[in-house]
Structure formats: C-alpha cells, structure tokens
Amino acid sequence: MDPKPLVVANWKACKTIPEALEWLENFQSKAKTKEADLRKVEVVVCPPFTALEPMRLKIKNQQLKIGLGAQDVSPFPDGPYTGEVTARMLADLVDYVLIGHSERKKDFGENVKTSGQKMNLAQKVGITPILCVANFDEIPKEPGNHFHLLYEPAAAISQKGVYRPENPENAQKNLAEWKSNFKNVNKFLYGGSVNPTNVAQFLAQPAIDGVVVGNASLDPNVFWELINHVLP
Ligand code: PGA
C-alpha cells in the first residue's frame, strides 16, 4: 500500500465550472512553492460532475499533482436510466468515486444494497471506490477488492460551517477494529468536520491513513492551510 496520507476534498453540491477552475488556479499557485513536500501527500478533489472534465483538462495540461474523484455513480450500467451517470462514463475522468455518503442515504434513499451495486460497477472499470459508512452494517457483504473505507458518522459532519468532529481516539478505536476485519481495504479514512486545526490529530492516529474534507476544502486558502498541517 502507498504509505502517503490521502486527503480527499468533497465539494458536495458547490461550485460552478469557473469557480472550480479558479479554486484550482489558486491552490496551484500556493502548491508550486512546496512541490517536493507535496509528493508525500496524495490530494484528490471530488467536484460536482459538471466540473470534472474542465478540471481534468486543466490538471493534465498544467501537470498538476491533484487527483480527481466523483461524488457518486449510478447503481445501474449504461441504459434506460434517465439522469444517471454510469461508472463507464466516469472511467475516463476519475480515479476515485465516493459511494454511499450519508447525505445520499439521508436525502436520496440510498442503502447498503445500492452501495454494493455501485462498488461492483466502479471496480469493474478500474475506479477505486471510497465507501462511506458510519457503522459495520453499511459495508456490503461482497465489497470486492481494492477500495478505501471512510468512517464518517453523520453527526460529525459540519453544519453551516460549524465543526463538530468525532473524538480522534474514538475514530481510531473504530477504524483499528475494522482494520483487523478487512484485509482487502487499501486505506482507512476518517471524515466529519476535518479542518486545519484538527487534521494533524486525526492523521496521528495509527489506524487513520487519510481524511475526507467537506467544508474546509471549499476555500483554497483554508484547504492549503490544512494541507500544510499534513506535509512532513
Ligand atoms: P465536513 O464534510 O468536512 O464539512 O464535515 C465531510 C463530508 O461530508 O464528507
């Protein structure tokens, strides 16, 4: 396994295409000053679907050290599913996809079954799923190989910019237990109110290999500050 800490920015339903490109520009101008250190961290941004291709092109043209992920994928293959974006469509755009985020479970009726379908389709086309769960029951029976597992209790997710993180020792305890049960997981991540003031505490826990960052990833200045607490 790649020992670099993984930092995933989840923008949720925020940012138009120009806003996404401006974020990239801003982040990159800061990142240029610490290129060598940044090789020791893996940074992945999950923008809305609409910004994926413009961001991919900019990242490619400017050879930026930023990976891309989708925030969701259809539980169905290509076919008569109006409005869906399938794994095959995403395969050229992203390396990662968030699956089963608690907001999708709360607002869009998703469950462990849909997570399983999505994981299967994503893995078939070579996209690494980041499976989002708050407890063991949300992990599909046959999750496949090579995925990252995100422990994210819904109550720890920031609300209207107010942070309410899980205690890092609690997150460590849960993830350490899961680690001993799941040998086919690449990385174990924590998410929920991660911000510049607490990211180092979470990553200092031996069972936590990375973090998913929502609110604190939207402003490139705040996100850069957070990354600086992750750099060696
Ligand atoms: P938050 O969101 O960092 O704003 O709490 C994280 C997430 O929901 O993935």
Image: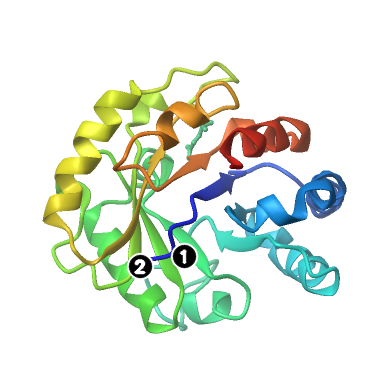
Q: Quadrant of the C terminus?
A: top right
Front-most of 139 and 207? 207
- Residue 203's x, y, as percent? 43, 37
Q: Residues within 10 Å of mark 2 (few under 14, many from 20)?
A: many
Residue that label 1 marks: 73
Q: Label 2 vs label 1: CA separation?
A: 6 Å
Q: What residue would you read off at disc 2?
A: 118
Residue 60 placed where, x, y %? Answer: 78, 73
- Badge 2 element: helix
Q: Residues within 10 Å of mark 1 (few under 14, many from 20)?
A: many
Mark 1: which amino acid?
Answer: Val
Seen at 56% across and 74% down, the residue is 90
Q: Is residue 27 above or below residue 58?
A: above
Q: Nearer the viewer, residue 85 or 119?
A: 119
Q: Is residue 149 left or right of residue 141?
A: right
Q: Give whichever of discs 2 and 1 has the lower sequence position.
A: 1
Q: Are marks 2 and 1 in contact (CB under 8 Å)?
A: yes
The residue located at (43%, 69%) in the rendering is 128
Note whether residue 135 is visible.
no
Residue shown at 32% from the left, 70% from the top: 146
User: Residue 212, labelled with which disc?
Assistant: none
